[in-house]
Amino acid sequence: MSYLRNWLSGKCADVAGYSSENGARVQNWDCTTGTNQRWEFVPSGDGTYYYLVAQHSGKCLTVDTSRPNGDFGGGVGQWQCLGQNNQMWRKAYAGNNAYNLVARHNGKCLDLDTRGGLGNGATIHNWSCTYGTNQLWQLDRV
């Protein structure tokens, strides 16, 4: 079990409002001890990709594939784990205990959208890999 701490903001990937609903937003938020910020890396069975399962809900970190556009691969939320490629993530080690998390279905990275600032509630989405610090995640073990 790990917290996903963004390298740039120092904040964690957080399921908004402790929601257990499908489609609940995953956002940037101050790191707490909340189970809505704890993610289990569950092997997908191929030796490379993982499902990131929220401890509080048992649901998977999922890319919304309904509206991809250019660099934008889609919003990120939680959804019932269905074994789909848009729920599988590869850890790409970037040094200094940081990783890029790359979605299997499109090869794009988990990204903190810095256009709205780095504060609580900032958007986390799927974006072309630029390897900037806003796409680096520390996996802080619980």
Image (cartoon, helix red, strand yellow):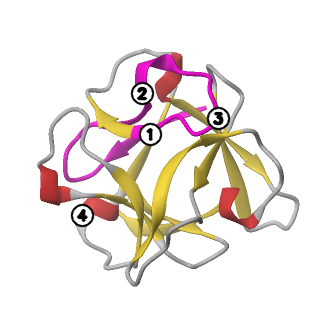
Measuring 72% from the left and 63% from the top, which residue is drawn there? 49
Q: Which residues are magenta?
A: 1-26
Q: Between marks 2 and 1, how big is the CA–CA gap?
A: 6 Å
State whether residue 110 is above or below residue 56.
Answer: below
Name the residue type under label 3: Asn
Measuring from the top left, give residue 6's x and y in whole percent. Answer: 31, 48
Q: Residues within 10 Å of mark 2 (few under 14, many from 20)?
A: some
Kindly report which numbered mark, 3 or 2, lies closer to the viewer in this rendering.
Answer: 3
Q: Quadrant of the N terminus?
A: top right
Measuring from the top left, give residue 80's x and y in whole percent. Answer: 75, 38
Rendered image: mark on residue 26:
1
Residue 8 drawn in magenta: yes
The secondary element bearing badge 3 is classed as loop
Measuring from the top left, give residue 73's x and y in whole percent. Answer: 47, 71
Of the residues under marks 4 and 2, which one precedes in the sequence? 2
Residue, disc 2: 16
Residue, disc 4: 133
Name the residue type under label 1: Val
Q: Between marks 3 and 1, how big is the CA–CA gap?
A: 11 Å
| Residue nearer the viewer, 131 or 63 | 63
Q: Between marks 3 and 4, how big is the CA–CA gap?
A: 29 Å
Residue, disc 3: 22
Q: Between marks 1 and 4, how big is the CA–CA gap?
A: 18 Å
Q: Between marks 4 and 2, how big is the CA–CA gap?
A: 23 Å
Measuring 45% from the left and 15% from the top, which residue is drawn there? 34
